[in-house]
Image: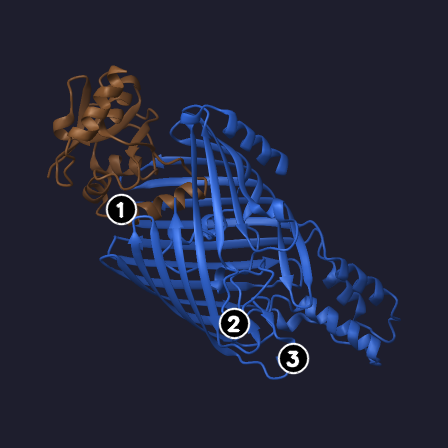
Amino acid sequence: MRLVFICLLFLTTFSYGSDIDFSGFATLKAVKTDSRTAKIRESISQPNGVTKDELDFSFSSLGLQAEWHASDNLELVGQLLLKEQHDNQINNAIKLAFLRYNLNSNWQFRAGRTGLDLFLMTEYRDIGYSMDMEHPPVEFYSIIPHQNLDGVDLQYRVPLEQGIASIKAYWGRSEAPIYSDIDFYWNVELKSIVGVVAQYETLNWLFRANYTTTKSANEHEQQRLLRDALAQVPLQIWPTKNELIDSLYIIDERFTYSALSMRYDDSDWLIQSEISLTDSTSNILNHLKAGYVTLGKRFGLSTVSFTYSVAESDNETVIESGPLTPSPELLYLYEEASTYSGFYQLDQRSTSLTWRRELSPTLALKLNWKRTSTNHLPSAFYLHNIEQFSDPDLSFNTLTLSFNWVF
Amino acid sequence: MNRLLISVFFLISYPISATADIAVIVNKENPIESISQRQLIDMYMGKYVAFPNGDMAVTYDYEKSHPLRGPFFLALTGRNESQINAYWSRIKFSGKVSPPQSFSSPSTILENIRNTPNAIGYVPADFVTGDVKVIYQIDD
């Protein structure tokens, strides 16, 4: 993908100047929380979280985009997003690198690295200026770290009496990092991603349905080591160890994602909602349900919006029982295996209030207060102060102030 | 050079009023005689960039903060320029559709429409000349 991006950059740089469009977006963001246990972050791909008594600016980002209009039908698009990350920096920074070909006014084909069109806001969730919320709801958007698709998509659009109907199919692969406590890092690879999005849109209304299926292409090294260690334990000591070994094997497991979305925006009032179900053939992720609803009202250059979002999982019942004769080594193995099996125990809800103020037609200020209640910590949504696990604070507040700019 | 001088002359001498009538224009050879408000919205919001007969269109717009841009989108969609910019930042930075080509003045749009059969743009109504075709009018 780096090579494709460099080729696009080369083409855009050395083609005729009048056909190239350079643009960008930036977010300067400060985050503060009162949680003692959870280190706040907006995505499980974020390597660091904000701790109590700390004012953090690491959520800030800068995006640069170049578009080369090769002809009326063909365009090449490249986009870099610069933000804090630890590993594989260049590949992760390339958000878009694709060619777009309009066969006619109805059919569009794209190939290369595009946005993975799972959620209503997936493809622009890093562009703070584009949304009235301060950031997409964590309960809904943080669960799947993958934002890009390396592959192809084909879209058909048709004007109807009242609006535009479209259907898009996509195929490809994707990778994205997951960070967790104690320096846990896993570049999660998904293969054979196949999805379809149906959408109907008028000036004020948008309705959308998505179904996507994929398979896991890799596993974390620790998972393999755990399975190898479990394989050495006699069955008499740990009768359920084989079930546990099976549950730790994730390669080629199928994951499915289904979502319904709607938005109403008449320039005064805004209503937006999404619900989703994420499921898999692996015990690690079962029936993860998420949803949110946002209600907003515009007052001149200001917008006030309220969001309620929730995530619920059914994962706690599937962790296998431990060894019959517990020794420190076996208990350690059990705890580690349980941590993996329970990674997607995500049961929490939040309410948030956002005030957005247009400072100019290209610059907005946003202030957000959020109250989060979670059923348990640790949670994959956050990083943690590990010494606080014995007495976690399950409700906490987060305050965010950001400047969002497009240019 | 003459064209450049004419363009510069219009740019500095034409007082663009935020309340002037606006004419939506196409190339004289374009077979389209008129367009509905909804079709115009679909084109300028990147939802369906084609003329009513199905031919692909090239949309021309002004650079951000040009005084004609805000009144045009407000009259067309009921949305202010900030809302339009936020909308287009969703569409553009997600790589779905390219935004309209942007120009600095009505005279450059007029000149480009004269030379591009499938282009559509908007200029102040009293700026229209006989070598382009008006297909929609936004009255003050």
* CA distance separating discs 1 and 3: 50 Å
* CA distance separating discs 2 and 3: 17 Å
**The disc label shown at residue A54, or none:** 2
The quadrant where residue B114 appears: top left
Label 1 sits on residue: B81
The numbered mark 2 sits on a residue in which chain?
A
**The disc label shown at residue B43, or none:** none
Label 3 sits on residue: A387
The numbered mark 1 sits on a residue in which chain?
B
Regarding mark 1 in the picture, which secondary structure is present there? helix
Q: Residues within 10 Å of mark 1 (few under 14, many from 20)?
A: many
Q: Quadrant of the C terminus of chain A?
A: top left
Q: Amino acid at mark 2?
A: Glu
The chain coloured blue carries which letter? A
Chain B, colour shown:
brown
The quadrant where residue B115 appears: top left
Q: Amino acid at mark 3?
A: Glu
Residue A115 visible in the shown view? no
Q: Is residue A278 above or below residue B126?
A: below
Residue drawn 16% across and 41% down? B18
Q: Amino acid at mark 1?
A: Glu
Q: Residues within 10 Å of mark 3 (few under 14, many from 20)?
A: few
Q: Where is residue A105 shown, x and y percent of the image?
A: 38, 29
Mark 2 and mark 3 in contact? Answer it, CB < 8 Å.
no
